Image: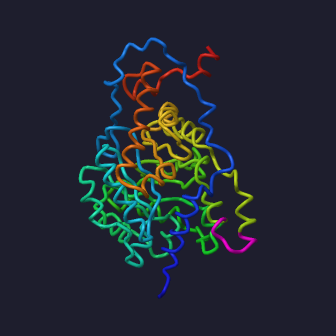
Amino acid sequence: MTIDPIRDRKDQHLDVVLSGGGRHARDAGFDAIRFVHEALPDIDHDKIDLGTDFLGHRLKAPLLVSSMTGGPARAESINMHLAEAAQALGIALAVGSQRGAIETGGAGGLTQALRNRAPDTPILANIGAAQLTRGFGVDEARRAVEMIGADALIVHLNPLQESCQPEGDRNWWGTAAALEVLIRKLNLPVVVKETGAGISAPTARRLVEMGAAAIDVAGAGGANWGLIEGERATDLADKAHALAFADWGIPTPEAISAIRQACPDATIIGSGGVRNGVDAAKAIRLGADVVGQAAGVLEAATLSTEAVIVHFQIMIRQLRTACFCTGSASLADLRVALLQADRSEA
């Protein structure tokens, strides 16, 4: 039987992440950020409004299930669990790369069945920027969107991963121009995201000027795809090459703050090393509109829809309590909640 190299590689990716491998050498830095505690909140905990608008949709909580799976057969159950949970919770869902599904037909649950499981959920399709100069253009992007009934498209940037992947695409000449053409011609919102190394403020500004509908910082502090590729590599030189980039990238809180300052009107997704609802609250305070999580929910997603729902219910409860203990009746209030650094400088 012929082995599909893309599906095999993605299966290996899941194995590495589920085993706890490929973690960034340093944490995202959320622990250095602390809210000033409000001991006398004059609000009702249960009536705190966590709703937010995202790409033309209203979410019940500012959460996005970030891209994580794309091709192997077991991804079908993972994707279905995530879709059903997103529908139940009123949060957004981004699928993993659809390259394999488009090229080989190995859908991995990336079909209209996903939309059927989540009829009211904002769903984001996904392709890689590296493929935009290798035969993936507007037509292929539309196929990715149509195959799952998506509301928007993510284009992921992963130069570190491609550089560390033995079979990676390392010639990115012309990728920016191809990305801008896609954004201008697709007639759907295009979100541009990194994959764990962060996006700088100048690059974010450039993407916004291209017409990107949102920027997902996907900063350093969670999964390190350079290390993941190093762990699955069989050549010792490939492993040694990847290991040097164990602490590479822009930490998520730093990326969020810098991009919000540079692009005050941009829609920002804060992801990368977000562990819980308190981290999510900090990301929102720093400037994120929506917070994404991938590796943190993957184990639950391999189990059941119920496990995913419980995972995010806990996260939402933590976010709500962070709002309560800062006196924030809404996310708008949370965005101006006092931080300990603010108090010390006063």
The picture quadrant where one finds residue 160 is bottom right
Q: Main secondary structure of the magenta part?
A: helix
The boundaries of the magenta stretch are: 231-238
Q: Position of residue 316 (x, y in %)?
A: 40, 36
Q: Position of residue 10 (x, y in %)?
A: 51, 68
In depth, the one of 7 and 147 nearer the eye is 7
Quick check: 135 above or below 155?
below
Magenta-drawn stretch contains 23: no
Q: Position of residue 268 (x, y in %)?
A: 46, 42
* Residue appearing at x 35%, y 48% in the figure: 92
* Residue appearing at x 54%, y 58% in the figure: 18
Q: Position of residue 12 (x, y in %)?
A: 55, 68
Left or right: 149 in relation to 175: left
In depth, the one of 180 and 63 nearer the eye is 63
Quick check: 272 above or below 344?
below
Give the quarter of the figure containing the C terminus. top right
Magenta-drawn stretch contains 236: yes
* Residue appearing at x 53%, y 42% in the figure: 275
Left or right: 346 in relation to 113: right
